[in-house]
Amino acid sequence: MPIVELSHIDKSFGPVKAVEDVSFSLEKGELFGLLGPNGAGKTTSLRVMLDIFKPDAGSVSVLGGAMTESKKDRIGYMPEERGLYQDIPLERCLAYLGALKGMRPVDVKRRAETYLERFDLAAYKNKKVKELSKGMQQKAQVIATLLHQPELLIVDEPFSGLDPVNTQMVKDLLVEQHEQGVTIILCSHQMHQVEELCQRIVLIDHGKVMLYGGLDDIRRQFSGNAVLVRTPAELPGLPGVERIEPVNGAVKLHLLQGTDPQSILQSLVARHLPVEQFEVAMPTLDEIFIRVVQGPPQGQDTSQERIA
Amino acid sequence: MSKLWLVALHEYHRHVFTRRFVFGLLSVPLVIILLVGLFFLIISMENNTTPIGYVDHSGLLSDPLPAPTPTAPDRPVPMIPFANESDARAALNAGRIQAYYVLPTDYRTSGSLRVVHIDQLKSSASQQFYAFLGANLLKRQDPAVAARLVKGADITVQSADGSRSFSSSDWFSFVFPVIAGIGFIIAMFTAGGYLMQAVVEEKENRTMEVIITSVSSDQFMAGKIVGDTCVGLTQIAAWLLLIIVPILVGRSSVPFLQTFRLSSQTLAVLACTMLPSFVLVAALMAAIGATVTEAREGQQMTGLISLPIWIPYMLIGLLMSSPNSSLSLALSLIPLTAPVAMLVRDSLTILPAWQIALSTAIQILCVLAAIWLAGRAFRLGMLRYGKRLSWRELFARPVSHRKKLVE
C-alpha cells in the first residue's frame, strides 16, 4: 500500500492552473525525487499533499488515508521558503516547533542538543535566529524538520544555501534517515543530487507530470543509440557508427539506426583493441531534464511518459 | 497540552517577556503621572502669592479672623488692609499687591463689592479672598456651624430602588470608568497590534508554512487570539495594580479617594462589554494581518477598527446629557462602540439588565463571526506572499462548495 498517493490532482489559483491531473505514489521507505523547473507546480503538489491547499479535483492519501491533525506529527516538512521565528533564541524556537509536533519538552531538549552538536550549532543555541548566518539558519531548519523523528520526510530544496561541507552533511543525514526506513520526498532541481540519492522520480513541468518512474528505467528510455568506450588505443572507423564524441577521456559512439551495441563490441574485440570500459551510454538526469523541459527532439512523442 | 494552548503560551511568552512590552507597560502610568505632575505644576505656577489688599468701609474686617488655609496645591495669599483706596491704588501700582477689594458700607446687606486689578486676577486668589470674607461673615456663629456653611452642601443623588447613588464629592467614581475605558482600549490595541504583527511577520519570514503542517489553522488562530488577549489582560492587570495600590496608599490623605468605590454593576458592565470587545478587536486584527502583505499596510487598516471605538468619547457630551436617548442606546448596542458607551452611561444612569444582556449577546455573536472571519482569512491568506487577499476573495464561496452546489 502506497504511503503517499496523489491521484489526478487539479489545483488552480484564479485563472492560473498550478497543477493538472498530477498523479504519483510512493512506497514506505522510498527516497523519491520530485523534480521540475521553477514554477512547475512542485511546491503546489507538496502543499496539496500536506493539506495546506485543498485540491480542486482528485484525491490525496497520506500515511494510509486522508490527512488528519495527528498525522501531521508523523511528517517532517522543510519548505523551500525557510521559516523560523527570528526574534527568539534558536533553542526556544526548536523547542516550540518540536512541541507543536507533539514532543515532550525533555525529548525536544535531548534531541535538539544532539542535532545542534552534530551541525556545529551548539554554541549558538542561545542566539536569536536572526543573528545566525543563512547557512546556520538552513541547518537549524533541517534540525526542526527532523527533531520529531518523522516517518515521512518532505524536503524542498534542502541543499540551497549550503556550502559543500554542509551539503554533504545534509546528504549523509538523508541517506541515514532513508536507511532507518524513513520515507523521503526530495524536491529539487539539483539533478546530480537527486540522481545520487533517489531510486524513483516524478518530473513535473507546467503543472503536468512529464516523467514518472524508476530512475534507471527513465535513463534507459532516454539513452538513445550510443555506447561509451574507454580505450588507450586509437579507435579505427567502425561500421554502424554515425559519429564519435569525446566524453571525459572516453568516447561516445553514436550508432546508426539498426546498429546494436553488441555488434560494436564484437567489432572492437575482433580488432584486438584493449577495451577498458564499454557500456551503453545513459543520459544524465540533467540531460533528461533539459530534454523534457525544453521539449523533445522532433518526432518524439510529447505526451507524458510513465514508466512503471 | 493541546496545541492551541502551546500556541497561546508561545505567543504570550514571546510578547510579554520583552523590553518592548515592559516599556509599554510602564509608559502609560508614567505618562499619567507626568500629566498629573504637569497639571499640578501649571496650577502651582498659576499661584500668585502676591498679597491681596482690601479697603473695608463696612467694618466687617475691622478685627478679622485669618483667611482659611487653602487646599493644596493652592498656596496662601496674604490679605492686607488699607485705610483708603488711594493707598491701595498706590500699592497696586507699585506691585506690592496683585489686586484690592473695596467693601462698601452696605456690604453686609447688599453683598456687592468692587475689585480693582491691573492683571487678570487668578481664580485661586479671588477664592481665597471670598473664603476670608466668608469666615469673617460667620465669625459670630458656632465654629462647627460656620465650618459646615463654608463647606457647602454635599448632595447625594440616589436611584429610586436605592441600588445606585452618586454624590458631588464622589466624582472620581464617575471619572474612573471613563479612564478605565481608555486603558482598556490602549491595551486592546496593543494586544491586537501584537497579534496582527505576529501574523504578518509569520507570513513575511515564511514560518507559517512550517507551523500549519504541525497545527490546524483554526487551532493556530484561536491559540494566537487567546495568547494575545492574555497579553492585553496582563497589561490591564498591571495598570490596575499601579493605579489601585496608590489609591489604597493615598486614600487617607487624598479626600477624593476616600469616597472612591466601584459598584458591582460597573464591574459587571466592564467585564461584559470590554472582554468580548477585546477578543473582537484581536480577531479583527488577526484577520487584517492575514490579508495584508506587510505590517505597515496592516497598521493603516487598523483605523477601520479604532475609529468606532473612540466615537463614544467624541460624543461624550451627548451621552452625558442624554444617557437614555435612542442614540445612546444605539451606541451601547453597536459592536466596538458598545464598551465605552455602556461604561459612560453606567456612571450616569441605571442601565436596564436587558440592555446589558443584549449588548453582551450582540458582541459575543460578533466575536464568533470575527473568529470565523479571521480563521478564513488566515487559511486563504497565509501563503500569499507579496499579494494582498481581497475582501471579495475572503467572502467568496470555495470552489469545492460551488462544485457541490452545481452537482
Image (cartoon, coloured by chain):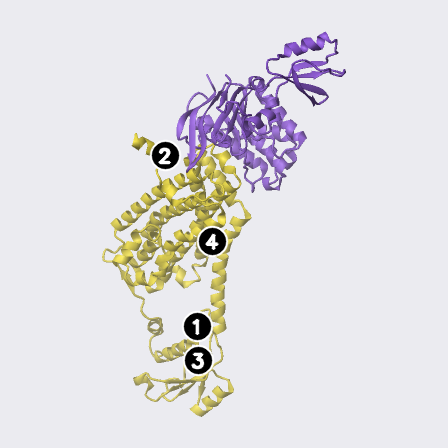
Residue type pointed to by label 1: Pro
* Distance Cα–Cα, label 2 vs label 4: 53 Å
The one nearer the camera, B38 or A143, is: A143
Q: Quadrant of residue A225?
A: top right
Kindly tell me whether residue A79 is visible in this rendering.
yes
**Do the dots labelled 2 and 4 sit on one chain?**
yes
B27 to A57, vertically: above or below: below
Label 2 Cα neighbours within 10 Å, binned few <14 / some 14-19 / many ≥20: some
**Secondary structure category for the residue under label 1:** loop
Q: Amino acid at mark 4?
A: Leu
| Image colour assigned to chain B | yellow
State the separation of the CA atoms marked 1 and 4: 29 Å
Circle 4 crowding by C-alpha within 10 Å: few under 14, some 14–19, many from 20: few
Dot 4: what SS? Answer: helix
Residue A22 x, y percent position in the rendering? 45, 26
State the image coordinates of residue B380 (x, y, percent, origin top left): 42, 38
Residue located beneath label 1 in the image: B70
Residue holding disc 3: B120
Disc 2: which residue: B399
Seen at 63% across and 12% down, the residue is A261
Q: Between marks 2 and 1, how big is the CA–CA gap?
A: 76 Å
Q: Chain of mark 4?
A: B
B195 w.r.t. A25: above or below: below
- Decide which of B154, B385 is in the foreground and name it: B385
In the image, which is nearer the foreground, mark 1 or mark 4?
Answer: 4
Residue tagged 4: B242
3D distance between C-alphas at marks 1 and 3: 20 Å
